Amino acid sequence: MMRITGAMATAIAAFAVVAGGLAPPAAADDAQIARGRYLVGIAGCSDCHTPGGMMGTADMKRYLGGSDVGFSIPGEGVYVGQNLTPDKETGLAGWTSDEIVAAIRTGKRPDGSELSGVMPYASFSRLTDEDAAAIAAFLKSIPPVTNKVVGRYKSSDTVPISVSAVLSPEVYNALPASQK
């Protein structure tokens, strides 16, 4: 009786896949990940999803690990950029690539809840399939950052973090000069 080694088993499995006309599961390649990195960079994702990004000095050790500053939408509350890393406890590790693409394009999480209106999903809905997949591949490739981001805060909540807010000209102009 012939003994099958691990290498032989791999070769037999590869032959069976090719002979059967089945393609092995697609994995992100370096070019796709590089494209995703480029797109995430020009889209400014780290501005809202990296600690310090909204304050001018992003903490690149926690790149895309979730913001420490909220963004206020009057009447809706304060939204905080979530952890986009593949961390199992606090990030996107449980999301499939298709779920990440759907969230980017539609503003809906896998559970059906909506992302913040600040998230430019209406613009991202026009991404090509290839570009959207590249972003998802890149997000799945980066180092996980454990960072539980709290938020959304309702308008009535006391907010314990710094907040970026859009103010009407009347409200802004009424602020004392030292607060502008």
Image (cartoon, rainbow, N blue to C red):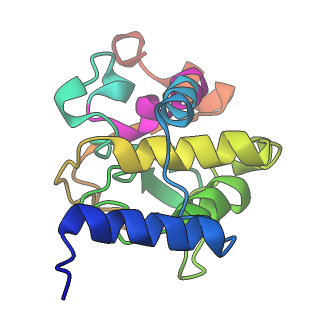
**Side of 84 where 39 appears, left or right:** right
Give the mark count: 0
Q: Residue at x 29, y 55 (%)?
A: 159
Q: Is residue 35 above or below residue 120?
A: above
**Side of 88 where 26 appears, left or right:** right
x then y, percent, for residue 8: 29, 66
Can you see residue 118? no
Q: Residue at x 35, y 27 (%)?
A: 53
Residue 68, picture quadrant: top left
x then y, percent, for residue 103: 61, 61
**Side of 180 where 120 appears, left or right:** right
From the viewer's side, name the closer residue of 155 and 55.
55
Magenta stretch prevailing secondary structure: helix
From the viewer's side, name the closer residue of 175 and 99.
99
Q: Is residue 5 above or below residue 134?
A: below
Q: Is residue 100 above or below residue 42?
A: below
> Which quadrant of the rendered structure holds the C terminus?
top left
> Which quadrant of the rendered structure holds the N terminus?
bottom left
Q: Residue furthest top?
A: 177
**Which residues fall within the magenta stretch?**
39-51
Magenta-drawn stretch contains 47:
yes
Q: Is residue 89 above or below residue 81?
A: below
x then y, percent, for residue 75: 59, 60
